[in-house]
Amino acid sequence: MIKTLIAKIPWAAVNEGAKEALRIAVIAVLPILYAGLNTTTGDINLNWKLILVVAVVAILKWIDKTIHEVGKTTNNEELVKGLTRF
């Protein structure tokens, strides 16, 4: 069942979702590096909890955008609303 469901998802929608997730990741790079910068020594200590949060947000945005794009291509008003449905 899941295999047939995944086969029906247009790859263009998955690509749009991936672009959205990558945008979030790219935008988050500088703040993460700045938050881990030690101005005294110049070392960078990465905060892995912060990286995990950014990864989770990027994945959720990928799913949301993919659902939205599938809704647009299939003219399904419920799917157009994405994950949050508002």
Image (cartoon, helix red, strand yellow):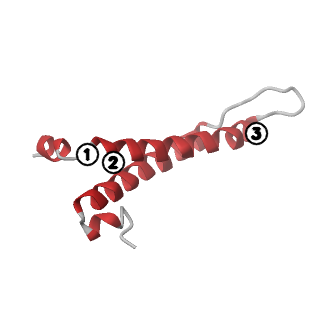
Distance in Å between CA atoms under marks 1 and 3:
38 Å
Disc marking residue 71: none
* Residue 21, percent from left and from top: 48, 44
Nearer the viewer's eye, disc 3 or disc 2?
2
Q: Name the kind of residue labelled 3 in the image.
A: Tyr
Q: Name the kind of residue labelled 1 in the image.
A: Pro
Residue under pointer 3: 34
Residue under pointer 1: 10
**84 and 74: which one is in front?**
74
Secondary structure beneath dot 2 equals helix
Question: Looking at the image, is 29 positioned above or below residue 86?
Answer: above
Distance in Å between CA atoms under marks 3 and 2:
33 Å
* Residue 36, percent from left and from top: 73, 36
Neighbor class of circle 2 (other Cα within 10 Å; few <14, some 14-19, many 20+) is many
Q: Earlier in the sequence, mark 1 or mark 3?
A: 1
Residue under pointer 2: 13
Residue 31's image quarter? top right
Secondary structure beneath dot 3 equals helix
Disc 3 vs disc 2: Cβ atoms closer than 8 Å? no
